[in-house]
Amino acid sequence: MNIKVDLKKNIDDSYDVVIGELQPQHFKKACIVTNPTVSALHLEYLKSKITADELCIATIPDGEEYKNMETIEQILGVCFENRLDRSSYLIAFGGGVVGDMTGFAASIYERGCNFIQVPTTLLSCVDASVGGKTGVNNKYGKNLVGAFYQPKGVFVDPRFFDTLPSREFAAGVAEIVKMAVTFDAEFFSFLENADLRDKENLLKAVAKSVEIKASVVAQDEKEHGVRAVLNYGHTFAHVIESETNYTGYLHGEAVAIGMVMANTLAMKLGKISEKDAARVKNLLEKYNLPTAYGVKDAEAFYDKFFLDKKTKEGSIKFIIPESIGGFEIIKDTPKNIVMEALNEFLA
């Protein structure tokens, strides 16, 4: 006997990414999730814009190394102690780490409550806050525990860019470059010729990056196809972050190195010219992003690819550019070709 559980439904999870000065908002019950660095710089400003009948604050440690289940428990503890319910809001106020963990906590708190993103880093504004990927790291790798859970809105206030350290700013630029390389050759040319330290140019780049990300997510919310392309550079980057215990590089810095490594593989496969690979590297170095990494053990590095979420049925999936503005998702790449690419980075 078969009894069907018919769950076909139409749910509109659409939301806006608002770029501009944060406008006043009021909630019944809300919890701001932030860290000491962001809190010291911007919490009073946020509280002047966000009001609630009941408002609490969960302050979590600052850093990728704290992106774990222990910190999730800390966020949930504040929610339970303040008796938030499923109609309450968690407000992610920080960079990608804060956003990923707040979203994950919201996805599991009482089986799901609301959350919004108020990103404060360039990387989070252009990438991490948009698309509903949430999660934490564990000893096996990066973001291996998590959920797809969309926010109710994303609010990009350019004032937060003014206090970004140079490394954090550059880390965000790496994610902007990533999207241009794989999706838009004209945008890449703009980035080559513009200085993103200029506010007007930066806002154009932010808007274009969000536009690209939104389009990709709309086509493939849960990464069954084209959304995987947004992981260009990340397959290599996640191994680098794991090998350095999430303390050696900012995420965007690791992605910059990962793009150079992916381009090396692409050249081995005849997919991108040496000239285009050099254009990508030069653009990254324009913002003092790292482009080199010393691989200590190529075999061990290769083995870590199999812990990546994009690996399926024992096949490693690589995202590589096919000239500037194009991409290819490849799998079953011969190990010897991958090893040749890795050997060029041996310490």
Image: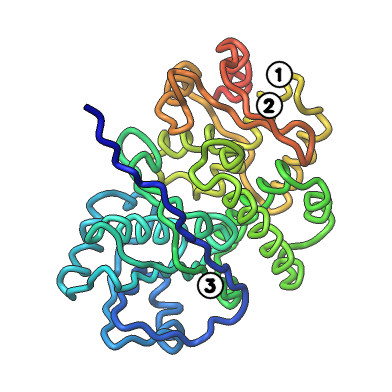
CA gap between label 2 and label 1 equals: 6 Å
Q: Residue at x 63, y 48 (%)?
A: 289
Counting residues from the start of the chain, the first of labels 3 and 1 encountered is: 3
Residue type, label 3: Phe
The numbered mark at residue 170 is none
Q: Which picture quadrant has residue 332?
A: top right
Q: Is residue 232 above or below residue 79?
A: above
The numbered mark at residue 268 is 1
Q: Residue at x 54, y 26 (%)?
A: 317
| Residue 115 percent coordinates (x, y) | 38, 67
CA gap between label 3 and label 1 equals: 41 Å
| Residue 140 percent coordinates (x, y) | 33, 33
Taking the image as shown, residue 200 lies to the left or right of residue 256, namely right
Taking the image as shown, residue 69 lies to the left or right of residue 39, namely left
Asked if the residues shown at circle 2 and circle 1 are in contact, with their CB atoms under 8 angstroms apart, the answer is yes
Residue type, label 1: Lys
Could one spot residue 35 in this view of the protein?
no
| Residue 276 percent coordinates (x, y) | 81, 35
Counting residues from the start of the chain, the first of labels 3 and 2 encountered is: 3
Mark 2, other Cα within 10 Å: few <14 / some 14–19 / many ≥20? many
What's the colour scheme?
rainbow
SS at circle 1: helix
Q: Is residue 120 above or below residue 177?
A: below
CA gap between label 3 and label 2 equals: 37 Å
Q: Nearer the viewer, mark 3 or mark 2?
A: 3
Q: Which residue is mark 3?
A: 155
